[in-house]
Amino acid sequence: MAQSLAGQNLKYLRKLRGWTQEELANKLGIKRSLVGAYEEERADPRIEVLEKLGDMFKLTLDDLLLKDLSEVKNNYLARRRQQKLMSEHNVIHFVPVKAAAGYLAGYADTEFIDELNTFTLPMLTGGHYRAFEIVGDSMLPTPSGSIIVGEKVDSLEDAKNNHAFIVVSRNEGIVYKRIEKNNRNKNKITLASDNPAYQPYQVNAEDIVELWKAQMVISKVADQQRWDVNQLASLVSNLQEQVSLMKKKYN
């Protein structure tokens, strides 16, 4: 009888997604110590565990038990992913405001993401994109109700200062802001609004779970913000007052 490759494949799939043993254990509904035992081949995964893993990755029991998924020539996941990319070229998942709370809990759950509505934009290629609906006037002149299409930034270190991002964090939720990294304190990130009426504020870098660099803004024509001279003068005046107050405070 052929030796089972279930433990080896379980470890490969976990690392492929970047999950810890604890995270995979939670998704499978088992103890972390069991995941460790399976990966070290001290125990064989139960059938119900393999069925959950198969559903998660769209693999059969034969794939999990008998095939080395890490081999490049026999990488069924890579083949399936390529087929999906060919059939769903540049698919962008859309996160409306009503799904924001669910997104914070399920941003790493492929089943949750697959339930979101999708669309495509032919001018965006070669990246990993997602769209978020924003509300409020903190990023004026980008109007409330706009959809921000962002490209995934894998690391905070790759994010450039003063660029606009969709920032997903544990404490602030989903916000659309410009980021400013602190060279002296890398544990803190400043989030700033385009609307000067809103003060910048800081968040802990470790609380940020996703960054999406803004690439496009989609909004209704009727909602486009129109600026006139008086509005601009008011904004400048407001900004000057804030600067004056800050000078007085520090002097």
Image: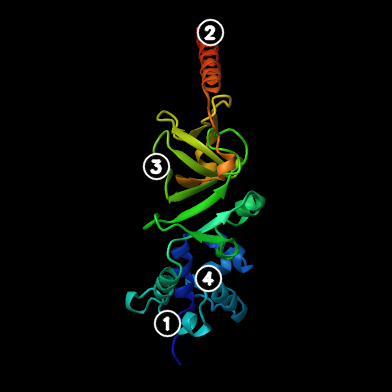
* 1 w.r.t. 23: above or below: below
Among numbered discs 4 and 3, the one appearing first in the sequence = 4
Mark with earlier residue (2, 1): 1
Tell whether 185 sits left or right of 237. Answer: left
Q: Which residue is mark 4?
A: 37
Q: What is the crowding at mark 2: few (fewer than 14 residues within 10 Å), some, or many (at least 20)?
A: few
Asked which secondary structure carries label 1, the reply is loop
Give the percent coordinates (x, y) of residue 159.
Answer: 40, 41
Q: Quadrant of residue 86?
A: bottom left
Regarding mark 2 in the picture, which secondary structure is present there? helix
Residue position marked by numbered label 1 in the rendering:
67
Q: Above or below — where is 84 with respect to 201? A: below
Foreground of the two, 33 or 82: 82
User: Pointer 2: what residue?
Assistant: 248
Instruction: Describe the colour scheme in one phrase.
Output: rainbow
Mark with earlier residue (4, 1): 4
Residue shown at 53% from the left, 83% from the top: 61
Foreground residue among 9 and 151: 151
Report if residue 98 is visible in the image: yes
70 vs 175, left or right, is: left
Question: Percent x, y for residue 103?
Answer: 61, 53
Residue type, mark 4 in image: Ala
Q: Position of residue 216 (x, y in %)?
A: 46, 46
Given the image, on which type of amino acid does mark 1 rest?
Answer: Lys
- Mark whose residue sits in front, 4 or 1: 1
